Amino acid sequence: MIKLVWLIPLLPLIGFLITGLFGKKLSKGLVGTVACGAILGAFAVSLGIFIELNGSAQKSFTLDLFPWISAGKLSVPFSFLVDPLSSLFLLIITGIGFLIHVYSTAYMSHDEGFSRFFAYLNLFVFFMLLLVLGSNYLIMFVGWEGVGLCSYLLIGFWFKNTAYNNAAKKAFIMNRIGDLGFILGIILIFVTFGSIAYGDVFAMAKSFASDNTVITTITLLLFVGAIGKSAQLPLYTWLPDAMAGPTPVSALIHAATMVTAGIYMIARSNILFTLSPLTMEVVAVIGACTLLFAASIGLAQNDIKKVLAYSTVSQLGYMFLALGVGAYTGAVFHVMTHAFFKALLFLGAGSVIHAMSNEQDIRFMGGLKKHLPVTHITFLLGTLAIVGFPGFSGFFSKDEILAHAFEHNKLLWFIGICGAAMTTFYMFRLYFLTFKGEFRGTKDQLHHLHESPKPMTLPLVLLAVLSVAGGLVGIPEVLGGTHFLDEYLKPVFEDSSFRIIHHMSHETEYLLMGIAVAVMAASIYYAYKVYVKNNTLPTDETEELKPLHKLVYKKYWVDELYDIAITQPLNFISSGLHKVVDNQIVDGIVNSVGIAVNWTSSKVRLVQTGNIGVYIFIMVISVVVILFARMI
């Protein structure tokens, strides 16, 4: 089965070609079947590879497909790497991707761009699969840039809306900033190691001493790429704006694909990062600051998708915190559980928006529990998972991250706990305002309220099951379980294992779990008291807000700051260059040439008198001059 790994990216690519080239000639049902079938086929092969790899003594396979680039000392084959890390990501991408595709067949059924949407989705999955399967940094970079392109196409899918186009351009440009760092890192890797193949680079890296300046530079450059793709401070602002795309796009980008690319890249390059304690500290601090910063913004947002978007930025911060403290397995574990509950929450939000006739403001919802029973219960389960309710998937993955953070640095652990408290509050604020209390929408919306069709609710149910049970693969020893995921990923992270030393006593672990659960319970109660018991509604932006509330409601004015500090100066410079360099110098040179030609031709044409005698005279003179010149 491992030898068939090339089928995994090929099937979505074929789906893209069919739906993209012939989609308008096919029925919507056939387009949906082809697109979903391509991802399902890729999932089936991925599952087979996962099972085979799990039962194999050899845990890493490199399959060379064909020669690709050969230039001087650079030789790059087009090859795939199959190991526990890539096989796990294959399951997440194709599994969650398939459910999102099925959901989209109903959600996008009335959209005129139905076939184009599924073509983009298939292409998106193709590039993400290429990213995780590549056996070298160049193939990873191709997939990296591909998902950036597809995110631009999907975020700006409804391109007739200027605001959506601006959001797509913002995502594309901000990702290019990070991508510059990534490609510089790849170049420095080749200069240092003479190869960009993972096997060669990681084998040679083991001989380098810790804190080597070159390794630190490489890892910092790679981390810049991860900051852009995985939306960390300061390059995070594109992700909330990515909500401009259809809701299934939000689920795909935020849950299983694009934003996890940075996590995968660092996890794949774990030995390089382990050799640079400075970079590890930078990663941990940036992750901690991001999780707290984004969580605080989520406290005051009223758009159901914007709340979930800032939640994604915050959860990504947890993953980077885990990477920075050396808990590579914990980061990947949270990637997996986050894919389950965040896809569920976004698709649940889409179900709510679908029922509310495209209303996204939670201030105009309420009381949807009785109208949307399946959406309600699955959304509640997703909420419990993300806040880390005991027994749910998020409890195990987040607890593992917090435990490692506590062991590494108590301040980082405290920031993580504060972020968890905020997460619990804004998620239950979202849940209570959406599903509890009285309906606050219009009579027309109330009249049209209905549960979503089965193609939308079935993925919600399956994701809810995964959100509840997904953490069972990582039950800690202190709770009498076995961390199967840690055992499975051990071959990938064994060279960095000396960084992951866990000597915490069971009493300390119980204490940390108890604190996390107590903080979560207190936040749930406070949200219940404010939004259910006291029936408090979010303040409208036109009303006077308290300074702290206004600060987080306005998202710390970061976008406005970027506009003043970066966008406006660049626009001013470009406007000046346009007026001076373009209009006066470039256009002046071109126009001067035209003027000179016109002036010269106006003088030369005087020679054309139309008098035959003059022409004969000029001809004779010319012959004499030629003869005289030859004699000289």
Image: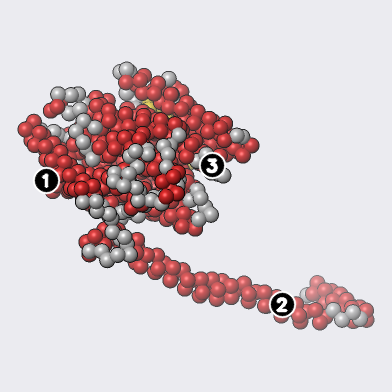
Residue tagged 2: 598
Mark 3–mark 2 distance (CA, rounded to whole Å): 59 Å
**In contact (CB < 8 Å): disc 1 and disc 3:** no
Residue tagged 1: 410
- The structure's colour scheme is secondary structure
Check disc 3 and report its element: helix, strand or loop.
Answer: loop
Q: Amino acid at mark 2?
A: Asn
Q: Nearer the viewer, residue 420 or 571?
A: 420
Horizontal side of 364 relative to 276 (left or right) equals: right
Q: Amino acid at mark 1?
A: Lys
Which residue is at 45% across, 52% downward? 168
**In contact (CB < 8 Å): disc 1 and disc 2:** no
Q: Quadrant of residue 489?
A: top left
Mark 1–mark 3 distance (CA, rounded to whole Å): 52 Å
Residue tagged 3: 110
Mark 3 or 2: the one toward you = 3
Percent coordinates x, y for residue 464 in the rendering: 32, 32
